[in-house]
Amino acid sequence: MEYLKRNFDILYIVVQVWIDGLITMAACMAGYWLYATLILPPGVHMPPMDDFRQLFVLITGIVLSCFWLFGLYQGQKSILNVEEYRGLFKATLMSFLVTSTAVFLLREVEFSRTPDHWIYNLARYPYELLRLENSDNYSRVLYLTLFFFIFLFSMLGRAIMFRVLSEFYARGIGNTNVAIFGTGPMALRLQQKLRLFPTLGYRFVGFVEARENQREGLVNGFPVLGHEDELDHLRDAHDLRRILIAKPEFDEDRLVGLCKKLDNFGIQYQVVPRLYHFFSRRFTVESIDSLPLITPVPLRGRPVYNFVKRTGDVLVSASILIGSLPITLLVVILIKRESPGPVFFTQIRQGANNRSFRMVKFRTMFADMCGDAVTPQSASDPRVTRIGRFLRKSSLDEVPQLWNVLIGQMSIVGPRPEMPFIVERYNETQMLRLDVKPGITGLWQVSEARKAPIHENVDYDLYYIENQSVFLDVTIAFLTVATMLRLTSTH
């Protein structure tokens, strides 16, 4: 067990490579079976699977290489694994293009007509090993089917491995001991993020303070380990491998001096920048004669993305509203039967560009207890009806919001709509949430921070706004379904 803890990162990456290889081979075989049994027209001859062994091996090698090139074996995890899924999509697309090119280049040719020269022989043997027989018979549809299954299987495999890794971290295996330099508001906020995301693999052991601010005791229940002059001792005593510097008030010379100390002691570090609010938006770093310049990237119109997103919103909302009519009628009857009052609960919310709209949901509370108050968090909240508890647990109370999506006030994925009296207290950074349409689901809803108030976790919405893409929307929707199933099964 001690060996596993010391070498966990390397062993995990090795296991991940083997699993990815097996998953890719399994996906190729599944894709071949689907193509041969369901897609191929009747009467058309399909070569046996053995004829595709070389192709499957070639695809597996290229897929693993692309995974490595796109950083999927670096052992670094992002919040909710979103960046890994994005890299997986890019790596799969690249492996498809590379494989298609390789198959074209490795077609059979007549070597016997080529002069017998040592350069020719040097290239001939690896070519003979790799060349693909019957490559002219490979179908484009088969290729698309294979790589669709590769991406699907890889996504599921990575999701499972992410859960396995989380279990290891929860048992104290593979965690990296970290400390936070500082005890101010930013340090406490950073410590809260570490607590919310144990899947990052950080085991927080305590705080380290500046020499001039030396203090003792507990901060947020964790000890102040010591000050910067004791870094060498603290590294050995607590097996510190990384320090997160949360002192944005430090001037440049002070920060550079601290980083130099950490380098000398062999401690990795990361720094919360002084202008951390500025970094909530996209930027590029340019330079004029080695002098770096941080340039904000203007928000693009993204007409193609907006068109695809709106089209998807209309199709999904209309399909679910029509398909769920029988369930909707049953819910209406149960709500009216249990308590008097309207079936639907409407409330003013703030949408894109701070425009007000009336959001609609199924009523889950007694009619005389509905109002602009804190949302019920407990299943035993006396304001919630019996059918309301079921609707909240199953998220069926959200179905009428699809009407808001259909008429363009909301989107399927986006920041959660907030009530006006809370928006009135927003600071400038929090107001950025109103740059896009609110959504029924979003990053915050599928995170571990969903139990906290929305306005206290604006980071998720800012990340989404700056990284909007069709792939990110699909990933959030997938995680939403998984979260709903998990929450429903635990109640």
Image (cartoon, rainbow, N blue to C red):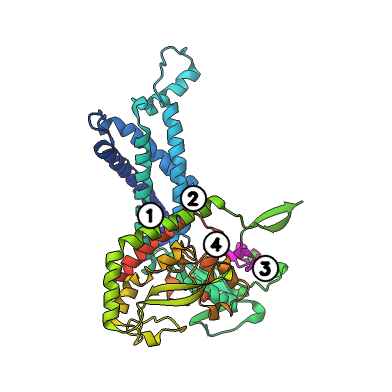
Determine whether the residue tagged by mark 2 lies in a helix, strand or loop.
loop
**Which residue lies most toward the left here?**
43
Tell me which numbered mark, 1 or 3, is placed earlier along the sequence: 1
Determine whether the residue tagged by mark 3 lies in a helix, strand or loop.
helix
Determine whether the residue tagged by mark 4 lies in a helix, strand or loop.
helix
Tell me which numbered mark, 1 or 2, is placed earlier along the sequence: 2
Tell me which numbered mark, 3 or 4, is placed earlier along the sequence: 3
Residue bearing mark 4? 465
Magenta span of residues: 260-281
Which residue is found at the position 66% from the left and 69% from the top? 274
Tell me which numbered mark, 2 or 4, is placed earlier along the sequence: 2
Q: Are marks 4 and 1 in contact (CB under 8 Å)?
A: no
Kind of residue at badge 1: Arg
Q: How many residues crowd around disc 1 within 10 Å: few (fewer than 14), some, or many (20 or more)?
A: some
Q: CA distance from mark 2 to mark 4?
A: 24 Å
Residue bearing mark 3? 255
Q: Between tags 3 and 4, which lies in front?
A: 4
Residue bearing mark 1? 158
For residue 131, above or below residue 343:
above
Residue bearing mark 2? 71
Q: CA distance from mark 4 to mark 1?
A: 25 Å
Q: How many residues crowd around disc 3 within 10 Å: few (fewer than 14), some, or many (20 or more)?
A: some
